[in-house]
Amino acid sequence: MILCMPFMMFQGRAQEAIDHYLATFPDAQLLEIMHHPEGTEIFDPEATEAGPGTAAPAAGTSQDDTAAMETVVDWDTTLVATAQLQVGGQILMIQDSLVKHAFDFTPSMSMAVVVDTEEEFHRITNSLVDQGEYLMEPGDYDFAQNFAWVQDRFGMTWQINHPRGTPNPSDTDSAANVAQSKAPEWS
């Protein structure tokens, strides 16, 4: 059997993200989690290049960004070795990288979330955008009665879709959007 699932690699904030996603999505479940042993450190190749005892920020961040992140994350005890989080029937693999790197999440790959109600749309969207930003503002679009594209505080992007309704078999355009028309069963 082959199983394919999204893999989300964080840089020291996986536990914080897991906790946030568990609070955001109805019936989200943490299926398994393993933490790295206490004292595990994240290797920073730039700090090594800068010389011993020098902590260089990861590429694309300023020293202030790195310092702010380190005040939020207890690097010694919260590093996630592997976790599986189920959201809307989809299993997400999550881990912290043990090597700091210049790349991070990109908006070209997003998690698509389809909801049944306007209340779910607003609750999930508002939770994800907290300390994040909109890539597409919430609104009524041709393809959805409510849609928003959000980059959350961890850099992960989410497309939240509240479709216009159930497909109408007599509407030829509707058949092309069957997958967008049904929200996941959260139970």
Image (spheres, rainbow, N blue to C red):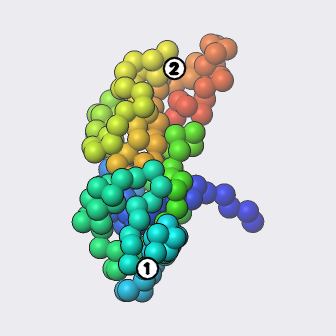
Drawn side of residue 164 relative to residue 172, left or right: left
Where in the figure is residue 152, as x and y percent of width and height? 37, 45
Q: Indicate the quadrant where residue 20 lies.
A: bottom left
Q: Indicate the quadrant where residue 148 lies.
A: top left
Rendered position, 32 above or below 129: below
Mark 1: few/some/many CA within 10 Å (<14, 14-19, 20+): few
22 vs 96, nearest the viewer: 96
Type of amino acid at the residue the image marks with label 2: Phe
The residues tagged by marks 1 and 2 sit, at their Cα atoms, a distance apart of 54 Å
Q: Secondary structure at mark 2?
A: loop
**Which residue occupies the extreme front position in the image?**
51
Which residue is pictured at 47% across the width and 36% down the height? Answer: 159
Which residue is pictured at 33% across the width and 42% down the height? Answer: 132
Residue 90 appears in the figure: no
165 vs 94, nearest the viewer: 94
Rendered position, 66 above or below 106: below
Drawn side of residue 168 relative to residue 155, left or right: right
Where in the figure is residue 28, as x and y percent of width and height? 39, 57
Residue 159 appears in the figure: yes
The mark closer to the camera, 1 or 2, is 1
Where in the figure is residue 65, as x and y percent of width and height? 32, 55
**Which residue occupies the extreme right position in the image?**
1
The residue where tag 1 is placed is 52
Quarter of the image with the N terminus in it:
bottom right
Which residue is pictured at 46% across the width and 43% down the height? Answer: 157
The residue where tag 2 is placed is 143
